[in-house]
Amino acid sequence: MDQQLEAVRTPPGAIAATKQHPSPQGANGSCVPKPNENPVVLIHRMTSNLYSTFGAIAPLLEQQGKRVFAMNYGYYGEELHGSSATQLVPGFYGYASLNDSLAQVSRQIDLVKQHTGAQKVDSVSWSVGSSLATAYVKQVCAEGVGTVVSLDGVLRGTTML
């Protein structure tokens, strides 16, 4: 497994995968995309991480010639105000405020564009990740966004938090 982790490349400044939470196979690697293909950014669900959410789909996207990037966002740790039992459990992400999470996702998308030279990105998102993908599209007025795929999107919000 360590050899696989050594091969994982995360764009500079991105929230890197760790040995406890590795990138799924097919994500954050050096796949050469098909010509005129946008890189794909995976945005995980709440109470999850990039590996548990996209461990099955990332290799399939890579096999189709997609350049796939994934990140963990929204860690609700001590640096954020408030309290949550999840801050004590490693591997849980997606609990920070939507504004904080959106800023992290936006930064990651900018890094992916810089890293690949792409003008646009596509996204695949699940649950609250779809809310973030939609908010990003609105934030940038759809500039630099190709296709947005929402799996079980939560576009009305939640009363959980």
Image (cartoon, rainbow, N blue to C red):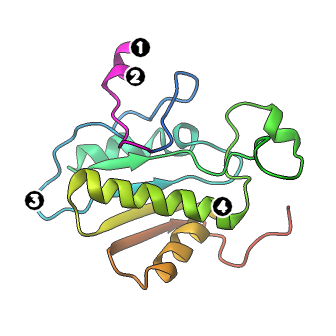
Q: In this rendering, would 44 be left or right of 38? A: right
User: What is the magenta range?
Assistant: 1-13
Does dot 4 land on a helix, a strand or a loop?
helix
Using a 10 Å C-alpha cutoff, classify the residue at mark 4 as few (fewer than 14 neighbours), some (14 to 19) or many (20 or more): some
Gap between marks 2 and 3 measured at Cα: 27 Å
Q: Residue at x 21, y 41 (%)?
A: 31
Quadrant containing the N terminus in the rendered view: top left
- Count of numbered circles in the view: 4
Determine if the magenta segment contains residue 7: yes
Query: CA–CA distance between discs 1 and 4?
Result: 31 Å
Do tag 1 and tag 4 residues touch (Cβ < 8 Å)? no
Q: Amino acid at mark 1?
A: Asp
Q: Are marks 2 and 1 in contact (CB under 8 Å)?
A: yes
Indicate the quadrant where residue 145 lies: bottom left
Type of the residue with mark 2: Leu
Q: Which comes before the other along the chain, label 2 or label 3? A: 2
Mark 4 or mark 1, which is nearer the start of the sequence? 1
* Side (left or right) of 31 relative to 47: left
Q: Position of residue 53 (x, y in %)?
A: 56, 45
CA distance separating discs 4 and 2: 27 Å
